[in-house]
Image (tube, grey):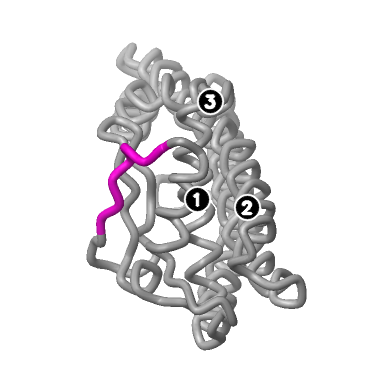
Amino acid sequence: MFFYDPTYILILPAFLFAMWAQARVQKAFNSYSRIRARSGVTGAEVARDILGRSGLSNVKIEQIPGKLQDHYDPRVKTLRLSPQVYGSSSLAALGVAAHEAGHAIQHDENYVPLAIRSSLVPVASFGSRLAFPLFLIGLIFSETGLSWLMTVGIWLFVAAVAFSIATLPVEYDASRRALALLAQGGYVAKDELPYTKEVLSAAGMTYLASTAVALTQLLRLLVLRGSRRD
């Protein structure tokens, strides 16, 4: 039974969706990294200008290694950009930089979905590490009275699922803000904006796919627990 688990069929569609979403964002980023915005500004310059206009000059901007590792760290109020974004004036780079600046603005405004997601970080991190080991122990040794560990594992994984769901409105709102800020500031021309939007839409799809994988994984755990009880 442990060598062949038919419940994997439950998560296969979500995994295929996630693979497609990841390929799509890579393709979109690579394609529009080759197209330079006519404004000529770099990702770092766009981020700094957007933050300054929003009264967030105290937010630091740093360059970090790695591709598509861009993020905003609310703990130290620092926006970190990859080399492909920091010093590039491509349409892809400007979109990513504005998106991360959008997160900094969310943080400053106490955007409720961001606050909810941030509050879930500790328990989600703890849950994602321990959920499957505890569930597996409970599954293997269910006949010895340890089946309750399956329930514990499921509840820990629920926290990770909740974090994934809470991430969706945060990311989509940051992209919405980014497109508006890019247009308002004149960093991206009207006819260039659809290309930047495609990059951000593709990135948003990866978060949707991640949530789909998490939800189907949760369903799989529930099915496994139910079958062992039977």
* Cα–Cα span, label 1 and label 3: 15 Å
Depth check, front residue: 55 or 83? 55
* Residue 228 is at least partly visible in this image: no
For the residue pair 19 and 110, the one nearer the viewer reads as: 110
Residue 189 higher or lower than 172, as above or below = below
Instruction: In this rendered view, identify the residue nearer to me: 155 or 35.
Output: 35
Q: Mark 3 points at which residue?
A: 109
Does the magenta segment cover residue 193? no
10 Å neighbourhood of mark 3: few (<14), some, or many (≥20)? few
Figure quadrant of the C terminus = top right
Residue in the picture at 53% in, 25% down: 109
Residue 94 appears in the rendering: yes
Q: Position of residue 85 (x, y in %)?
A: 40, 69
Number of other residues with Cα within 10 Å of mark 2, as a class: few under 14, some 14 to 19, many 20 or more: many
Cα–Cα span, label 2 and label 3: 16 Å
Please identify the residue farthest to the bottom as the structure is shown. 34
Q: Residues within 10 Å of mark 1 (few under 14, many from 20)?
A: many
Is residue 60 magenta-colored? yes
Helix, strand or loop for disc 2: helix
Question: Which disc is residue 181 wearing?
Answer: 2
* Residue at the (51%, 39%) spot, across then down: 54
Query: Helix, strand, or loop for circle 3?
Result: loop
Q: Where is residue 38 in the image (x, y as percent from the top left)?
A: 59, 82
Residue 21 picture location, percent across and down: 60, 65
Asked whether the residues under the numbered discs 1 and 2 touch, taking CB atoms below 8 Å apart as contact, a structural biologist would say: yes
The residue under the point 43% across, 22% down is 120
Name the amino acid, label 1: Ile
- Say what secondary structure mark 1 lies in: helix
Start-end of magenta stretch? 56-62
According to the image, label 1 marks what residue? Answer: 50
Amino acid carrying label 3: it is: Glu
